[in-house]
Image (spheres, rainbow, N blue to C red):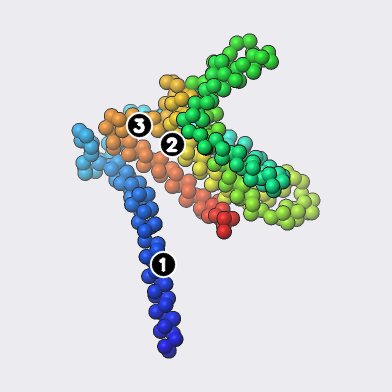
């Protein structure tokens, strides 16, 4: 009987110790992570004052989103983010497969490191360097003119939506590659060999075995690229020019004009889209399984 009581006391002390250890990081996440998001959602329904907002429930900020046609910029940014995410998946999946399944193990980390090197440079410098490539007298135009494919520089490469796509893709492609590499790590060689032994071609093995088993990595990569593209401003500022306007730029202008509820309302909609995508990922794509690879 005494042993049972002693065991219960020890378990109780372990729970208390675990709670004490968990409390600081939990408070950090709640105060600096969750609380600001909750406040943004609440403040989006408040009424603006001369310099801030006051508690008075109203949907005026959401009404202005449609009546002032801010939704057009919002939908345009969503479209660009979806397109960049799709292109990143089409380009990133073969690269991830090549790194994980084809490249020799001793060179694998070297290749992965090459995708990390650009992040050692300033974000603005990396994006600005694309202007030297896409510009009227940049690398692409000079090469095309040198080989005789064009007689004069192409005008639509820089300061256009195409340039924004290229900038976002070059910035966030690694965010697609790394989760897929982790996900492919979970696909054992025996699984692929079993598929081939049953007579499946490489294409059938890829589409019916490997890709379904790597859905967590695919979805995680898509979330990372989509959310990052949705909130990026530098590519639009440096590569899009005055003719291209995005949701982050709109939020910046609203905050500068002290139209806080409108900015909070748009941010709430972005948050709702992101959380909805994450819930779908956890439910249907088993995105949580990706982190088991790290154990």
The quarter of the picture where residue 86 lies is top right
- Label 2 close to label 3 by CB (< 8 Å): no
Cα–Cα span, label 3 and label 1: 42 Å
Residue at the location (52% across, 26% down)? 129
Of labels 2 and 3, earlier in sequence is: 2
Cα–Cα span, label 2 and label 3: 11 Å
Residue at the location (52% across, 37% down)? 120
Q: Position of residue 170 (x, y in %)?
A: 55, 33
Within 10 Å of the Cα at label 2, are there few (<14), some (14-19), or many (20+) other Cα atoms?
some
Above/below status of 166 relative to 11: above
Within 10 Å of the Cα at label 3, are there few (<14), some (14-19), or many (20+) other Cα atoms?
few
Position of residue 56 in the picture relative to residue 105 (left or right):
left
Q: For the C terminus, which image quadrant?
A: bottom right
Instruction: Residue 18: give its label.
Output: 1
Residue beneath disc 2? 231
- SS for dot 3: helix
Camera sees residue 200: yes
Q: Position of residue 291 (x, y in %)?
A: 55, 54
Q: Which is more toward the observer, 127 or 182? A: 127
């Amino acid at each position: 009987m005494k042993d049972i009581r002693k065991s219960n006391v020890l378990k109780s002390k372990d729970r208390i110790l675990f709670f004490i250890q968990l409390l600081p990081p939990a408070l950090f996440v709640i105060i600096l992570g969750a609380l600001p998001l909750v406040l943004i959602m609440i403040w989006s329904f408040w009424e603006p004052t001369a310099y801030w907002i006051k508690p008075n429930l109203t949907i005026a900020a959401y009404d202005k989103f449609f009546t002032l046609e801010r939704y057009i910029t919002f939908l345009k940014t969503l479209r660009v983010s979806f397109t960049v995410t799709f292109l990143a998946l089409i380009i990133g999946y073969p690269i991830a497969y090549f790194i994980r399944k084809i490249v020799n193990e001793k060179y694998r980390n070297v290749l992965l490191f090459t995708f990390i090197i650009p992040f050692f440079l300033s974000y603005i410098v990396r994006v600005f360097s694309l202007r030297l490539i896409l510009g009227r007298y940049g690398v692409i135009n000079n090469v095309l003119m040198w080989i005789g494919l064009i007689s004069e520089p192409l005008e639509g490469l820089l300061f256009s939506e195409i340039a924004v796509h290229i900038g976002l893709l070059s910035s966030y492609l690694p965010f697609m590659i790394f989760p897929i590499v982790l996900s492919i790590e979970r696909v054992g060689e025996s699984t692929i060999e079993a598929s081939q032994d049953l007579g499946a071609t490489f294409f059938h093995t890829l589409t019916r075995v490997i890709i379904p088993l790597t859905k967590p990595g695919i979805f995680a990569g898509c979330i990372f690229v989509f959310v990052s593209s949705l909130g990026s401003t530098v590519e639009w500022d440096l590569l899009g020019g005055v003719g291209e306007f995005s949701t982050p730029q709109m939020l910046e202008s609203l905050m500068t004009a002290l139209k806080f509820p409108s900015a909070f309302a748009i941010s709430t909609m972005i948050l709702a889209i992101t959380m909805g995508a994450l819930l779908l990922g956890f439910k249907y794509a088993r995105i949580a399984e990706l982190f088991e690879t790290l154990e």
